[in-house]
Image: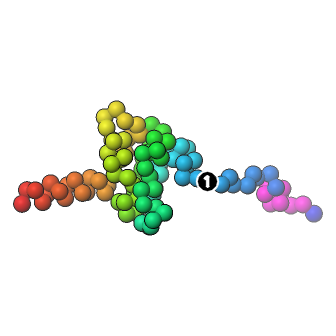
Amino acid sequence: MRNERTALSADVAPPRPLTVEGLLREDRIVVLAVPLTSATHELINAERLALMPPGAVLVNVGRGSTVDEQALASALAPDASPVMAPTSLRWRTARARTRSLR
């Protein structure tokens, strides 16, 4: 006997494998929450930042070194797309200003 649950699951396509590049191209909000390892060091680099659509948001809640900060600074240029506001970069900038005022 075929029940409704079996019929629905047979009609649903299996999930497609995801890649970092595919996620960056398709998603408007990306939250990066990975540990810092040799595999994740500068996981988000210039090439991957360029894949993000205009207006996309990148939130890095992991270690700062998982994002290439030089590439990110370049992407934050006035005519650059996507626009991102990295917390770690702002925090370091604010901390540097605080130290220079002492």
Residue furthest front as drawn: 38
**Magenta stretch secondary structure, dominant:** helix
**Vertical arrangement, residue 8 with respect to residue 54, above or below:** below
Say which quarter of the image contains residue 61. Answer: bottom left
Give coordinates of residue 95: x percent, y percent. 19, 58
Residue 32 at x, y = what percent? 45, 57
3 magenta-colored: yes
Q: Verify whether residue 74 appears in magenta.
A: no
Q: Residue 85: percent from the left, percent from the top?
A: 33, 48
Side of 7 where 39 appears, left or right = left
| Residue lying farthest to the left in this orientation | 102
Q: Amino acid at mark 1?
A: Leu
| 10 Å crowding of disc 1: few (<14), some (14-19), many (20+) | few
Quarter occupied by residue 83: top left
Q: Give the percent coordinates (x, y) of residue 68.
A: 38, 52
Q: Is residue 85 visible?
A: no
Q: Nearer the viewer, residue 38 or 88?
A: 38
Give the quarter of the figure containing the N terminus. Answer: bottom right
Residue 12 shows in this picture: yes
Q: Nearer the viewer, residue 70 or 24?
A: 70
Residue at horizontal 44 percent and vertical 67 percent from the top: 37
Q: How is the image coloured?
A: rainbow
Q: Is residue 46 above or below residue 98?
A: above
Horizontal side, residue 46 vs residue 76: left or right: right
The magenta stretch is 2-9
Residue at the far top in the pictured view: 79
Q: Residue at x 6, y 60 (%)?
A: 102
> Residue at the spot x=75%, y=51% of the render?
13
- Residue at x 51% of width, y 47% of height: 24
Which type of secondary structure does the marked residue at label 1 adopt? loop
What residue is shown with label 1?
18
The image shows a total of numbered marks equal to 1
